Amino acid sequence: MRQTGSWVLAVSLGLFGAAAAGWAHSEHEGHDEAADSASAAPAVPAEESLTGEVVDVFCYLSHGEEGLGTSHAGCAKKCIKGGLPVAIKVGDQLYLASMADHNPANERLADLAGKQVTVRGKVMERDGQHLIAISQIE
């Protein structure tokens, strides 16, 4: 009798587990479909030109005005070459910079740190963050 009870319990748990897994899978599928239909693809951004200062984001955020300009260019260049995030500061807006081919912009922008530069590329914004995927540095 004890073996039969264990066997029945094992079969019951197996069936319950399969049913629960099937339910979870169907719920997950429904969630994916709802997310797919609710979220429209973002619009393809047009190319724009931006003119601003090349800054290393760490020093800009941590040092304020002292992290800007020609007096800070040597440090900014070192930070950018070291791999810290690089951006273009246009007025009060910071645009994180990457190259249009999905590569970092650090190598291309490091020697321009602290200088005004005009870049061309696709500008994107999401959750308050701005990025330019640079296709051309003028």
Image (cartoon, rainbow, N blue to C red):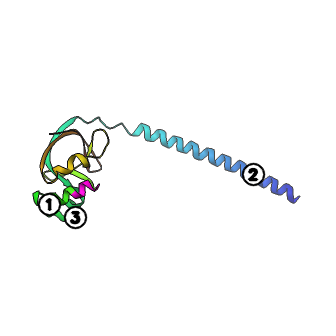
Residue at the right extreme? Answer: 1
* Front-most of residues 34 and 129: 129
Q: Quadrant of the N terminus?
A: bottom right
Q: Amino acid at mark 3?
A: Ser
Q: Which residues are magenta?
A: 78-83
Q: Quadrant of the C terminus?
A: top left
Q: Secondary structure at mark 2?
A: helix
In this rendering, which labeled residue sits more in front, label 3 or label 2? 3
Q: Residue at x 58, y 47 (%)?
A: 24
Residue 4 in the image: above or below residue 28:
below
Image x and y of residue 52, in percent = 13, 48
Mark toward the start of the polypeptide (3 vs 2): 2
Q: Quadrant of residue 26?
A: top right
| Left/right of residue 119 with respect to residue 28 in the rendered view | left
In the rendered image, which residue does mark 1 sit on? Answer: 72
| Separation of residues labelled 1 and 3 (CA atoms) | 13 Å
How crowded pointer 1 is (Cα within 10 Å; few <14, some 14-19, many 20+) is rated as some
In the rendered image, which residue does mark 2 sit on? Answer: 12
Examine the residues drawn in magenta and state their main secondary structure: helix
Image x and y of residue 115, in percent = 12, 51
* Front-most of residues 19 and 132: 132
- The disc placed on residue 55 is none
Mark toward the start of the polypeptide (1 vs 3): 3
Q: Secondary structure at mark 1?
A: helix
| Left/right of residue 39 with respect to residue 48 in the rendered view | right
In the rendered image, which residue does mark 3 sit on? Answer: 62
Q: Secondary structure at mark 3?
A: helix
Q: Amino acid at mark 1?
A: His
Image x and y of residue 123, in percent = 23, 41
Q: Amino acid at mark 2?
A: Ser
| Residue 89 appears anywhere in the view | no
